[in-house]
Image: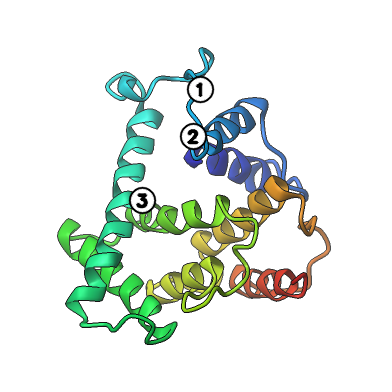
């Protein structure tokens, strides 16, 4: 997923392509990662091995990102206990648990840099990219996109920060995965990436 995001960022911002495109390698890696949720297939020979992190900085960064994302999801559950939440008490407690988990992760690392923020966001990317209905609220849980927006708003970033742009790209990857709404990133009127993200969420929720 990290390589897929990097690939799309490069095309969208460096090459100035107006529609999200991905290399065959990024698509293959993403499709393989998604397949692990349902079954196990042998690791594709053309992809770098996760254990090769000492020889590949991208693999090392990806592994660290994955570990932090898993930690955030575990800390979210611990936050419910720490905050003395009651089962079924409402959606607000889910937002609170996400922020508590994020704060613990940042405090434990003594920094709040771009990589750590991206790794924390990856926890919510995982929830989003495995769920065709990630734009919809579910029982006592807010939508995964809303949870991502809540965490982003808790970071000290401006409305045009690259993290908001990455969140928009996640919308594009999610859409391509499920062929649900067919977003295009051309001719948009929003002035900031945060506005664009909120607009995409509104449009996605109309598809319910």
Contact, CB < 8 Å: mark 2 with mark 1? yes
Q: Position of residue 3 (x, y in %)?
A: 51, 36
Viewer-side residue, 120 vs 128: 128
Instruction: Give the residue furthest to the top.
Output: 45
Location of the C terminus (image quadrant): bottom right
Q: Is residue 208 left or right of residue 26?
A: right
Question: Which residue corresponds to the image point at 70% horizontal and 76% vertical from the top-left?
Answer: 202
Q: Residues within 10 Å of mark 3 (few under 14, many from 20)?
A: few
Q: Name the spot of residue 90 as percent of width and height, x first.
A: 42, 86
Q: Nearer the viewer, mark 1 or mark 3?
A: 1
Real-space CA distance between mark 2 and mark 1, rounded to the nearest whole angstrom = 7 Å
Q: Quadrant of residue 10?
A: top right
Q: Give the labeled residue for mark 1.
A: 41
Query: Is 126 situated left or right of 78 in this image?
Result: right
The image's colour scheme reads rainbow
Q: Earlier in the sequence, mark 1 or mark 3?
A: 1
Q: Position of residue 100 (x, y in %)?
A: 27, 73
Height in image: 53 above or below 117? above
Q: Secondary structure at mark 3?
A: helix
Residues tagged 1 and 3 counted as in contact (Cβ below 8 A): no
Give the residue at mark 3. Answer: 115
Q: CA distance from mark 1 to mark 3?
A: 29 Å
Q: Residue drawn 30% across and 40% down? A: 64
């Amino acid at each position: 997923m990290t390589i897929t995001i990097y690939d799309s960022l490069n095309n969208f911002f460096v090459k100035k392509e107006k529609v999200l495109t991905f290399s065959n390698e990024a698509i293959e890696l993403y499709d393989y990662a998604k397949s692990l949720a349902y079954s196990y297939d042998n690791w594709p020979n053309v992809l770098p091995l996760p254990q090769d992190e000492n020889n590949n900085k991208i693999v090392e960064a990806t592994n660290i990102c994955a570990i932090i994302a898993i930690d955030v999801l575990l800390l979210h559950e611990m936050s419910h206990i720490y905050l003395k939440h009651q089962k079924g008490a409402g959606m607000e407690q889910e937002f609170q648990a996400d922020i508590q988990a994020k704060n613990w992760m940042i405090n434990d690392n003594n920094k709040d840099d771009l990589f750590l923020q991206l790794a924390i966001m990856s926890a919510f990317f995982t929830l989003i990219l495995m769920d065709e209905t990630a734009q919809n609220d579910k029982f006592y849980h807010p939508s995964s996109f809303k949870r991502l927006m809540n965490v982003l708003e808790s970071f000290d970033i401006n409305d045009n920060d690259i993290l908001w742009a990455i969140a928009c790209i996640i919308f594009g990857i999610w859409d391509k995965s499920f062929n649900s709404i067919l977003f295009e990133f051309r001719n948009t009127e929003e002035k900031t990436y945060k506005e664009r993200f909120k607009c995409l969420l509104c449009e996605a929720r109309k598809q319910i």
